[in-house]
Every structure is written in structure tokens, then in C-alpha cells.
Image (cartoon, rainbow, N blue to C red):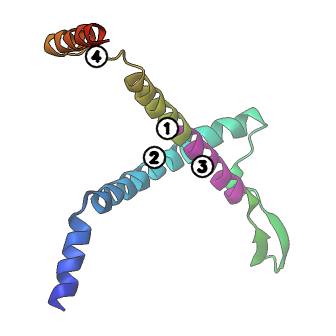
Amino acid sequence: MRAFLEEFKNFISRGNALDLAVGVVIGGAFGKIVTSFVADLFTPVLGLMIGGVNFQHLAWEIGGSPEDPVTINYGSFLQAVFDFVIIAFAIFLLVKAINTLQRKEEESPPTLPPPEVVLLTEIRDILNRHSQ
């Protein structure tokens, strides 16, 4: 049991597991923000633009009694689709920005070698020419 706990401790203290945990927590919080944006800001404005439709109340009644109808709530589904598209777009923009920053770092001009290395290279080249 002690070896198992030691192995678990090593696993959890590695950077990857901690990074993943932080990513999940931040992702969950980001998802809540986007869900609120879609539900509270985007969908009402979109509903007004298309004639005052409230997406959350869109449903097809497929049976049941008048007191207890059976419905397919496609408005809630549309809201979830909007959430997904906006989250996916936000993640796309974030990844694109990170990739752009990494590309700029990779494209930085090569650093010049120290003067000692340049001098030694010149000496080597001179010696090679004289030995031929």
C-alpha cells in the first residue's frame, strides 16, 4: 500500500498532472462565463433580431396531457450549440494567438557567437588554408 501511495504522490506532483488539473478548473470557469454570455446576452439579442423569440422556451409538443405535455425542447439544444460554437471559437482564437507568439519567438534572428568563438573560427580557417 505504501508503494502505491508513493507512486500516486509522484504522479500527482509531476508537472503534467498539475497543469491538467489547473486547465480543467480554468476551463470549467471559462465554460460558465461563456454559457452566461450566450444565455444572458447573445441569445436574447438574437431573439429580438428574429422577432422576439425566446430560445429557451422553444419546444415541440409531441404528446402527453394538457397538464403534463411531453415536449422536445429544441430551444435548449440550440442554446447548447451556441455555447459550443462560441467556446470553440474562443479556444481557436487563444490557440491561434499562442501559436503566433511561439512563431515570433522561433523567427527571432540568430544570436551572434561570442567574439572568442569568431576569433577561434578565423584562426582555424587560416590554419586550414596554410596547411593545404
For the N terminus, which image quadrant? bottom left
* Residue pictured at 26% horizontal, 12% vertical: 131
Q: Which amino acid does label 1 sit on?
A: Val
Name, please, the residue furthest toward the front. Answer: 132
| Residue position marked by numbered label 1 in the rendering | 95
Comes first in the chain, label 4 or label 1? 1
Looking at the rendered structure, which numbered label has been put on residue 33?
A: 2
Q: Residues within 10 Å of mark 3 (few under 14, many from 20)?
A: many
1 and 2 marks in contact (CB < 8 Å): no
Sequence-first disc among 1 and 2: 2
Q: Do the residues labelled 4 and 3 touch (CB within 8 Å)?
A: no
Residue depicted at x 28% and y 59%: 18
Pointer 3 or 1: first along the chain: 3
Q: Are marks 2 and 3 in contact (CB under 8 Å)?
A: no
Q: Up-down: is 7 above or below 42?
A: below
Q: Name the residue under label 4.
A: 111
For badge 4, the amino acid type reads Thr
Instruction: Select label 4 or label 1 by which is in front.
Output: 4
Image quarter for residue 38?
Answer: top right
Residue at disc 3, secondary structure? helix
Magenta part of the chain: 75-90
Residue under label 3, please give it.
Answer: 83
Q: Which residue is drawn at 86% across and 73% down?
A: 62
